[in-house]
Image (cartoon, rainbow, N blue to C red):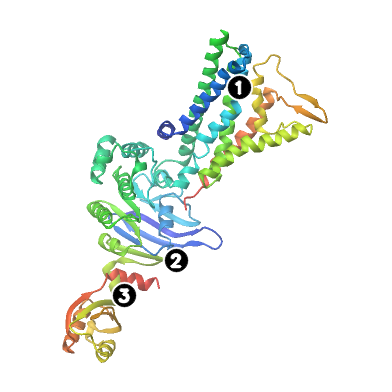
Amino acid sequence: MDQMIKIENLTKRYTFKILALKGISLDLDKGDCVGFLGPNGAGKSTTIKILTGLLKPTSGKAYIDGKDVTKNKKLALRSVGCLVETPEFYPYLTPIDTLTYLGKIRGVEDLDNRIEEMLKLVNLTEWADTRVGSFSKGMKQRLGFAQTMLHDPELIILDEPSSGLDPKGMAEIRDLINSIKREKTIFLSSHMLPEVQQIADKVALINKGEILAYDTVEALSKKYFTVKEVVIETLEPLTKDQMDQIDNYISKNGENRSQVKDITKIGDKKYNITFLGETEECRLVLLKWLMSQGIPIITFNPRGLALESIYMEMIK
Amino acid sequence: MTIIRYEMLKFLRGKKLYIMMAIIAIFVGAVLIIPLAVGEPYPDTKGMIEFFTQFINIIVILLVTLFGADSIVYDFEKGTAFVLYPNPVRRRTIFAGKLAAALIISIAVLCLYYLLAGVIDLGINGSVPSRIVYSLALAILYTICLMFLTFLISTSMRSTLASSVLVFATFFLIMPMISGILSIVGQKAWFLVTSMVTVITDILTVPFPKSAVIDAGQITVVDYHPTVLTAVIVMAVYAIPALALAYRQFNRKELD
């Protein structure tokens, strides 16, 4: 099969009351870069832990490259690199020791050169002989990424890879992932929308143990989702009549039909407009209409990301 | 082998080994200095080794506490399991590697202690009793038994501190307390593994000491000396199920 990951009716019950996964199914083809998106407690980490053999499912199956993870973990994880939760390493080991340890477990060939390459990739060469116990969170995350890539795996599973990092650290991890995504299959879980939208080609949305949607961002926008937002700045504060007028806006312009749901003042001359519209052109139609009504617009900016809107609506 | 090697590295780079060495040095120092300080002659060759073997119980308890109690639970508490366990390595390999490393370091320290005892005895008395080898063998067996029990505790706990405290308390306080009470009420604590430690010293004596009832005024106290066969059987009865349960527990442990 060409599927790198196949999840079939996966269920995980922790206790009588806690049902973390409710029979989810998900397939990833080889070469996909899929974001697994959901709020805290949605079931993302549980799914990843089952895929990486850290948890056993209550029922259902999980396959990696055709191998059942629960029955043959050793074979299934042979070509998987994963970073689960915030990585913690043995504090008495250096990065070289750590990567040597893990590399030997995996039987990596030409290990010394490979370690040097990985440390260079994650900018830890300078710290190669320093014990990990003195590392910051960001440095451990980078070392975690190095151990994920050490054996040149076909599938990379990342659980909240930017967790706990500052913006610079997040950007570094994002760049690292983008640099490898063309050659690998990547399954990346996150609750951070910008991270997923900038990296993933497809997104699976999960909430309360159920998959809500799974498709490309564009397809999700068209198929499920019509809510858009813009932020406008005006030369003068809008009057009540003007705000009522905008609030009552409905356009029946063919496929660009749209309707304003809400207008909210967010600054002295700044307003957030939420409207329903199936196409991206709806924004242009709205802009043209606002100008035709004499609204003194200085700026007109789409707010947030399409994925954010989809996500927020679906997890309501 | 890789897991054993890196577990050993943990012990060699950590403080626990140095703590253990310092304790050994204190015991050895006490054996050498205290008789001199009180103006008493050193015991004969057999007596000198018996002097050293009096401390075996506490040494073994410290060894299993320091090197075994957090072996399994550490990975789950600190999160290093998230890096080590999702690798193509069977859990039994990880378990065996950690157990082997804990046993290797413990037995190595034990052998060093016996070596020191032998060298000192040779230096002071000019000879070493041949039965010291049997004593060492029984001490190793006792260490293995206690280590298996320690691993059972380590796989059952969620905190390294709780595991260490429970291991130490079980072997140093709880079991000895029960055997002490039993001896006062005229009973032999034949079923407690810590009661078997006396064979490590008793094996040096020919003929092998027998249990006795001592009249201590209003109470009688049982001075229990299990035979070597009894000790081996009791240790086996504790060790084998402990190992099986520890492995089963470890295999089922989840990283939630």
Q: Is residue A44 left or right of residue A124?
A: right
Q: Which residue occupies the foreground of this view, B201 or A308?
A: B201
Where in the figure is residue B67, as x and y percent of width and height?
A: 50, 34
Which mark is drawn over residue B2? none
- Which residue carries the number 3 mark? A225
Q: Is residue B74 above or below residue B38?
A: below
Which mark is drawn over residue B53? 1
Inspect this view and state whether residue B232 appears: no
Q: Is residue A133 above or below residue A268?
A: above
Q: How many neighbours does mark 3 have within 10 angstroms: few (below 14), some (14-19), or many (20 or more)? A: many
Q: Residue at x 50, y 62 (%)?
A: A19
- Which residue carries the number 2 mark? A208
Q: Amino acid at mark 3?
A: Phe
* CA distance for labels 3 and 2: 20 Å
Q: Residue at x 28, y 84 (%)?
A: A260
Q: Amino acid at mark 2?
A: Lys
Q: How many neighbours does mark 2 have within 10 angstroms: few (below 14), some (14-19), or many (20 or more)? A: some
